[in-house]
Amino acid sequence: LVALSQIFPPLQVGLLFTYIAPLVFVLAVTMTKEAYDDLQRYRMDREINLQEYVQLLPDGRTEMRRAQDLRVGHIVRVQTNQRVPADLVLLRTTEPSGMVFLRTDQLDGETDWKVRLAVGVAQRLPPETNLSSLNATLYAAAPTKDIYDFVGVFTMHGDTHDPNCNTQEALGVENTLWANTVLASGSAWGVVVYTGTETRSRMNVAKPSSKVATLDLQVNFLAKLLFLLVALTAVVMVAMPLLSTWGRNRIQQNGTQQALQALLDLCCFMLLFSQIIPISLRVALDMAKLVYKIQMTSDPRVPGLRVRSSTLPEELGGINYLLTDKTGTLTQNEMIFRKLHLGFLCLSDGDDSMREVRSALLQCGEASSVACGFPYYTGRTALSDSSTILSATPTAPPAFPGHELNAQVGMVGSARFSAGFDWSGVAELGVNVAGPIPRVGSVTPFPAAVVRPRWLLGGGGPDGGLVGDVADGLCTHGPLRGSIGSSASAPNKRTEHAIREAMLAITLCHNVSPVESEGGGPHFFQGASPDELALVQFAATCGLQLSSRTPNTMVVREPNNRLRVYDVLHEMPFSSELRRMGVLLRNAHTGQITFYMKGADSVMAERIERSDWLEEEVGNLAREGLRTLVVACKHLTVSQYEQFHDALDAAKLTKLRRAEAVQSVLEQLQEDMQLLCITAVEDKLQPNVRTTLEMLRDANVRTWMLTGDKMETAKIVAQNASLVARYQPFYSVNVHSASEARQQLNGYPQGSINSPCLILDGESLQLCVAHQQRLFMEVACAAPTVICCRCTPTLKADMVRLIREHTKACTAAIGDGGNDVGMIHAAHVGIGVEGREGRQAALAADFSIRQFSHLSRLVLWHGRNCYLRSATLSQFVIHRGLIISFVQAVFSALFYFRPIPLYNGLLVLGYATIFTTGPVFSLVLDEDISEINALKFPQLYRELQKRRYLSMKTFLMWTWKAIYQSGVIMLGGVLLFEQRFVHVVAITFTALILNENIMVAVEVKRWHPLMLLAQVLTLLVYVCCIVALSSPTLLGAQFDLQFMLSVPFAWRVAALTTGQQWGRVSMTELFFGQPEVSCATSVWVPLTKLCKSQNACNLQTTCNPRIHPPN
């Protein structure tokens, strides 16, 4: 509007160019940035859309078709390592088993590979069958965002190749290939069901984050005040002459004309004072945020730091509450198997009494299998070289000769799945194996770290006891020693049977797959859950090794190298909502059907037969800081399985509310299960977690731990991680009604010297939030630490929102898994840890780090710098516009309040750009204290939490500075111009430039070479511009070079600059009642107190010699 107003002659107060140029510059920078981003997106989209795929035509021919030309119903082929172009239903694969592996890390952030199955009726057709000629119908539900669910039905209508296939087959997510995933093995034919914006990947594209930094909100508020200041100043300038006697007489003589003139003057003054509104501030802050991003991502002490939201770096400088996950965030998520509890027998890897039983495993021969009552297939003549016999000795754990057995999250090296033996030998068992046995081809690897239980590292030691004891129970018919409580017990058939059943459940109930490295490398297991990897690895070390796995079968190698085949009838995958998983298996030799299930004790307790030891032993293991899983089983008769199978098939064929129907059938299967054992694994803390949490506590950042684990485990981890201070008690809230919640919350000892840590379970937390929300938040905010156990993902996000609404404080959430995405989105600042469970949290977060310990440097150092630099930069840009506008106001007041511009438009434009931008913007490199002191004294962070460096008070102080300095510059310049008014422009403008640069120099705490360069270059550019523009047609009338090079000019400018710099501190103290407070002063005072207090305690503390108290 300001620029457009210059088109009208009555409103012209300068050159049109000087008003349009700043606007064009701001818009050009913004448009250039947006255009660059759009160009990058266009190139990526074009590259993806132009990729070609093989399409199967109705006549059986094939042709290449671009991804952008695919339509619903097209049948296309996807090759290994090729991106899936659209949402497909998998019809057929080159693998005889109909199974392919899919990489979904670009869709859901999970690094484990997903198994996908072809439609059964299509996969069983002869290879020469033309899929496009099938008389079939495919029903697919309406597109949704849920990538974990799909409802479809494939119907074959009397196919001529197989008349018996005139059936319906229910389709689920296991039959789909979502767009933007990558096929990891084999080749697949699929039919397109969703394209474009209806694909799962496009529907899950997150909308642009609406998070806005608190500093940006403060700047927006100050911008509104500045607009009001412009209007107020213009009104005052117009009203002042009207209040005089001369003005009143003019109004009486010609009121209408004077009113129109006053309105015109008002508009002109608002145009003259438009410099007060800092339109360049937004560009300056955006450029500063870019600098912050570069500094953070290039920090060698925080490797892997990623800034995914460049709008929030200042928010790191004022965090009040930190909400953190436990597993994978505070801990390493590297599970080590520690204990196996059978109720009457507890097997521990640290029991010395179990060393003797390890030798019993070596004595297991051919007769031991018969004694154990198991018929086996030896397969000696058919085994390949990679097949070996698991054995154990008193000094070495079971191993593969020539191969190292590892448990691994993800995959290392180029690997393939392998059965490890000849399937032709298995056929001798009489097992019905439909079709050729699958063998997955080579796959593209991705890195991951190895999880090595202590008892895998060799040597007898105390860690070998558990392996020997369990293995002995698996295959020996001789004596078995174990520990029941603290004493040894004579073995019996019950003990052997219990160990065997528990170990079979551990070996079979999981989503882990065995992997054999190419080139004879080490064998390892691949899976998404570190807990399951630890369990399967433990079973393999004891002698029960998962040898191979397909979608329909699992093969287990027993301690004396026998092979046992299990048919997979149904799998129930794990989900964070159900907190359990299960598998329904049939022993291929005996025909026994068994349903195994494992999960959290809270959900398993409701589904097993009554146990008098489950709750007690789970609590005991949790108090040791171990993560527990409850394992149970249920044997089914053939008729029971047929009833379940028919009900499940009927539920899968429903098109509406299929998920609820399927879950209802599964719930019936999970009733009255038999408890087998409790497994306990240890999850060690990440390095430097204790130090990081202690630093955050000293920085007055209140940390809440939200975990899905048990209360006892959470307590141990909190104490070990120093989340709870030493000797700090716990205050547990365990309620079942609103009245109990009110009573227990009122009983919290607020205000005590050693306030306890508040700890609640999920059920109690929901009750408190639902019925006593205000009281709960008052108590929780008064507690030094809060721990919420058994939290669901929804409950975690709700807790973040409650803190934001109740306290209005800045919150940060940190997590590593998909169940933490909700609270990461809900917090002011979301921080993701790139963990072993995938990258969902890291991709959804504003910032991502690799270790929790990096958080201290991210917050205390980078967060501090970002906030202080942006606050200082904002104040300088605002001050720069205020002072030149107030100089103009003083000048107009001297000339009877007429809207006469003082400075040429080119000078005004140069002042806001090349003459002052360099030194002002160089403040983004400033550091108020050293990095060492910022981390050594985290208490200094508390000053930032008050948000005082950019507030109404600082705004008034900087406004007063501008008023005082403009008065000194303008009035002093008028008094010193020596009979020639033209000199006042050169004197005052030069004083403005020097004043701004000197103020920057005074504000700098630590000089950077680029700061000095900016100061020098700015002065050189100013001199060069004055010389270049000193011609009579440009600025020669106002800038007399001969006079500017004289001594009178120099001392006048020096007097003006010195006077306003010397007086601003005294005047600030006069009007605000205290000395001017700078960042250096506010930091030095508490730092000095800390140094003195630590010296008083005889502690060795050396303050940074670069920090000096301001004069």
Image (cartoon, rainbow, N blue to C red):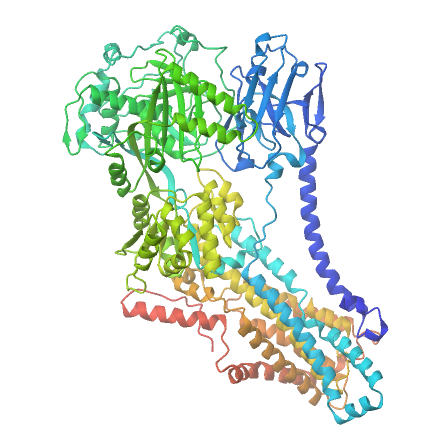
Q: Residue furthest bottom?
A: 245
Q: Quadrant of residue 754?
A: bottom left
Of the 4 image quadrants, the one containing the N terminus is: bottom right
Q: Position of residue 50 (x, y in %)?
A: 70, 32
Q: Quadrant of residue 514?
A: top left
Q: Position of residue 428 (x, y in %)?
A: 39, 5
450 displayed left or right of 862:
left
Q: From what the image shows, is residue 832 above or below residue 495? A: below
Q: Quadrant of residue 47?
A: top right
Which residue is drawn at the image coordinates 71% and 25% (left, top)? 65
664 displayed left or right of 267:
left
Q: From what the image shows, is residue 943 above or below residue 132? A: below
Q: Position of residue 721 (x, y in %)?
A: 33, 49
Q: From what the image shows, is residue 1002 above or below residue 609? A: below
In depth, the one of 924 and 173 nearer the eye is 173
Residue 669 visible here: yes
Residue 554 visible here: no
Which residue is drawn at the image coordinates 36% and 9% (left, top)? 379
Q: From what the image shows, is residue 365 above or below residue 1094? A: above
Which residue is drawn at the image coordinates 58% and 74% (left, top)? 999
Q: Position of residue 552 (x, y in %)?
A: 46, 18
641 displayed left or right of 176:
left
988 displayed left or right of 812:
right
Number of on-image labels: 0
